[in-house]
Amino acid sequence: MAEISHRKARTIIAKTLAKGREMELKPLSVVVLDSGGHVKAFEREDGAAPGRFDIARAKAYGAIMLGMGGQAQMARAEAQAYFMNAVNGVYDGKVIPVPGGILVQDKRGNTIGAVGVTGDTSDNDAEAGMAGIEAAGLAGQP
Amino acid sequence: MAEISHRKARTIIAKTLAKGREMELKPLSVVVLDSGGHVKAFEREDGAAPGRFDIARAKAYGAIMLGMGGQAQMARAEAQAYFMNAVNGVYDGKVIPVPGGILVQDKRGNTIGAVGVTGDTSDNDAEAGMAGIEAAGLAGQP
Amino acid sequence: MAEISHRKARTIIAKTLAKGREMELKPLSVVVLDSGGHVKAFEREDGAAPGRFDIARAKAYGAIMLGMGGQAQMARAEAQAYFMNAVNGVYDGKVIPVPGGILVQDKRGNTIGAVGVTGDTSDNDAEAGMAGIEAAGLAGQP
Amino acid sequence: MAEISHRKARTIIAKTLAKGREMELKPLSVVVLDSGGHVKAFEREDGAAPGRFDIARAKAYGAIMLGMGGQAQMARAEAQAYFMNAVNGVYDGKVIPVPGGILVQDKRGNTIGAVGVTGDTSDNDAEAGMAGIEAAGLAGQP
């Protein structure tokens, strides 16, 4: 298994949204990217702002392109802000380095995609996304 | 009803993909945009090329921004290619003027979103998308 | 095997360049992209113009994003020029639809990357690239 | 000698990767640019994140365009962050001002290209790159 499947992507989104409702979060938007950073599936709940696709994708895109989850990206941005600004230059401004971007790995530890969640606090976004990934039988690096 | 709902978007995608399988089409990618041209939901079937999100969105985005379906856009492009090139200048190159981009309207004729389908021939893409829209109890302008 | 390896990429480039010298072609530039369109390896021979990286990558990038080799892309561009112009809009102008862009597939027919060759005529570029791919024990779709 | 050769570029990359393995670094990506900032050669090891080409090139590109290695660029960024942000404005965001970008000079002190290394810490990246440049009989300004 080297690429996240359509079926797994749908499960991740459905379970992330279910977790968000259980946690009583604001309306969420959830994207699943493949291991090359290309969109596999996305859903935006009613009541979420129209621009949420771009934010969800930017969280997940940074995880893929840099090979690290949102927490590690945020740590780097806080330690060395000019570095993350420069990184965004080379990726055409498409990276948002905060929690909610999660690397998705199969059982052998290979990266097969990434998930991006946005709508509530970054930490809540990440918690819901991790629940979705685990419900699909996969591992997440938040 | 002024905006396509999350529930309707999911139905459109599921039924478009089902129609594609029934018609034995190549793997499809289907996007649903809201009435402002922003992504509401998207799914890409296994086996579809990674760049299909951009094509699906561009078909639907042109329908929203110009207020006309892909068939009308294609007719205009064939009659006046420089006009469509210029249109793409103002929309940052994000419009693909061929069938498979479909305006979605409620029962009173209000535009509430658009669907973009890609993967097979443009005409087959449009046929599958129309089936999905109708299965959701909505009307499409292909 | 789901992703082209560093070792295979190096073999493809070395053997493509060797074939070019055997055919007495002009200096070549050869890129190998992974299945997500990201650069895995590249070499530009002495005497090739400085901008050849972008052309090599654009030939291979179109193959990945559209899921078709350069010959099929060129046929589509010649039949429906405004469509290929519009496709380049959504891919930020990064696609050059001519021979020399080649999809690379493993023995089970899965796309694991793409090769882009530039420097001589498009047909000669493609012939050299196919020789490189086959020398690496892989299949190419030119 | 005014321009880095294909042969020298290949030696630099092979020896930089060998040094990285000897130092037990994470998988590296190494680019060689010519004196005009254009890509001459690149390799990405298996296991490196897909976006590493852009980072490697941005380290080397800044060295060429500003005529200073990554250490000097980082010092400037830390002393005057807004200056480096503005520099990135004029270079389209394509500069990452940290160690791992290295100017390459011939025996007479002429700049003939630049190397960019990424994958481990910036300091380790630079150390591996310097070893590669010296193994090719050239001098580096890290």
Image (tube, coloured by chain):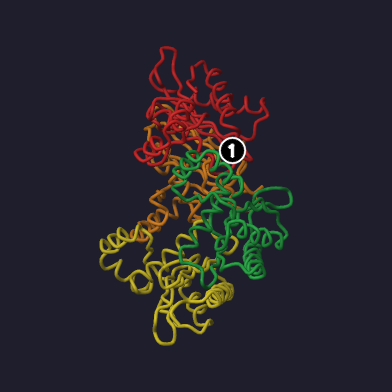
Chain colours: A orange, B red, C green, D yellow
Looking at this view, is A59 or C48 the one in front? Answer: C48
Q: Which quadrant of the view contains residue B114?
A: top left
Disc 1 is placed on an element classified as: helix
Badge 1 amino acid:
Ala
Label 1 CA crowd tier, 10 Å (few <14, some 14–19, many 20+): some
Q: Residue furthest top?
A: B108
- Residue C110, image x and y in percent? 68, 48
Looking at this view, is A101 or B133 the one in front? Answer: B133
- Residue C12, image x and y in percent? 65, 63
Looking at this view, is C87 or A70 the one in front? Answer: C87
Let me know if residue A24 appears in the view: no
The structure residue drawn at horizontal position 38% and vertical position 50%, both measured from the top left corner, is: A93
Tally of numbered discs: 1
Let me know if residue B3 appears in the view: yes
Mark 1 belongs to chain: A
Q: Quadrant of the N terminus of chain B?
A: top left
Residue at numbered disc 1: A135
Q: Which quadrant of the view contains residue B124?
A: top right
Q: Is residue B43 left or right of residue A117?
A: right
Q: Is residue D91 left or right of residue B97?
A: left
Q: Residue furthest front?
A: B79
The structure residue drawn at horizontal position 40% and vertical position 53%, both measured from the top left corner, is: A74
The structure residue drawn at horizontal position 64% and vertical position 65%, both measured from the top left corner, is: C16
- Residue B123, image x and y in percent? 57, 28
- Residue D131, image x and y in percent? 51, 79
Asked if residue D89 is positioned above or below residue B106 in the image, the reply reads: below
